[in-house]
Amino acid sequence: MSLCDINLNYLTCCDRFFGGNDIFTYSHETLGHKSWIDHFFVTRGLEKYLSLFDVIDVCDNFSDHLPIICSLSFDCNVTGCDCDSIKLPAYSVHYTDRWNKADIMLYYHLSGCYLQQITILKDILCHENNCNTKEMTDNYYEAIVHALKKASSESVPKIKHSVLKSYWNEELDDLKQQSIDWHKLWAECGKPRCGVVNNIRLRIKYKYKHAIHAAASNFEQQHADELLQFWLDKKPSDFWKCWNSKYKKTNGC
C-alpha cells in the first residue's frame, strides 16, 4: 500500500489526478528496480487548482531518485487572497563570466564601439584649483567601466557562481555533452530500458559520473597537500587564502 492509498480526511494526493501506468520516481538502472515513492499532498479542496505534475528526468542527475514538480494555479479574485501582499524572499544571485566561452572578437568590436561613444572632457586635465577634476575623473572612469561591462554582457556568457566547480576540465565538458546527446536520443526513442541506445546512454552516463568523482578526488588531494605545507610552514595567511580560493562558497542561490 502506498501513501496515496491511505484515506486522509484533510489531504488529497496529487498522484491520482496526474498518475500513469509507467511513472516512477526511483530507478536503480543497474538492478532494473523502479518504483513511485515520492508524492505531493495538498489540502483537500485545492486539488482543483492543480495545473501540473511531472517527474523530472535529466541526464546530469546521478541520483537514483527523480525530482518531482507540482504547480497550482490560483485566481486571486476567486480565492480571496491578496496577491500584492505576497512577498517572495529576496536572494542574492552571483554570476561569473565565462571568458573561456566568450566571443572575443565580438567583445573587441563592442567594447571599441562603446568606448568611442565616451566624451573626453578637456577640463579633466585642468590643473587650476577651481577645476573639479576629481569628480570629472570619477565620471570618466565610471563611463569606461560601464562601456566594458555592457560589452561583456552582450558577448560573454554568464553562469551562477555556485555552479562552477574548481576541478572542472575540458574532458568533463566533452563527457557531459556526450551524456546530454545520448540522453536526448534515448528520450526521442521512447526511453527504452533495453537495447543499443539505452546501453550506450548508461555507459556514457557512468563514465561521466566516474570522471567527475576522479577529478574531484584528485583536486582535493592536490590542494590538501598544498594546505598542509602552508600549515607546516606556519603561514596562516597563505593557508586561509588558499582555502578561501578553493573551498569558500558564495552565499546566494
Image: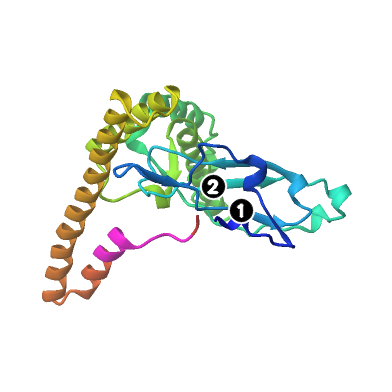
- Specify whether 191 is left or right of 207: right
Q: How would you rate the neighbour count of disc 2 (Cα within 10 Å): few for under 14, some for 14-19, many for 20 or more?
A: some
Q: How would you rate the neighbour count of disc 1 (Cα within 10 Å): few for under 14, some for 14-19, many for 20 or more?
A: some
Residue 32 sits in quarter: top left
Choose the circle earlier in sequence order: 2 or 1.
1
Most distant residue in the front direction: 1
Label 2–label 1 contact, CB within 8 A: yes
Above-or-below relation of 112 to 229: above
- Specify whether 237 is left or right of 108: left
The residue nearer to you, when weighing 221 against 227, is 221
Provide the residue span drawn in magenta.
242-251
Residue ID for mark 2: 68
Which quarter shows the N terminus?
Answer: bottom right
Say if the magenta span includes residue 249: yes
- Specify whether 21 is left or right of 44: left
Above-or-below relation of 18 to 196: below
The residue nearer to you, when weighing 4 against 250, is 4
Residue 166 screen position, x and y as percent: 28, 51
Most distant residue in the bottom direction: 234
Residue ID for mark 1: 40
Q: Main secondary structure of the magenta part?
A: helix
Above-or-below relation of 170 to 142: above
- Specify whether 3 is left or right of 226: right
Above-or-below relation of 232 to 34: below
Say if the magenta span includes residue 243: yes
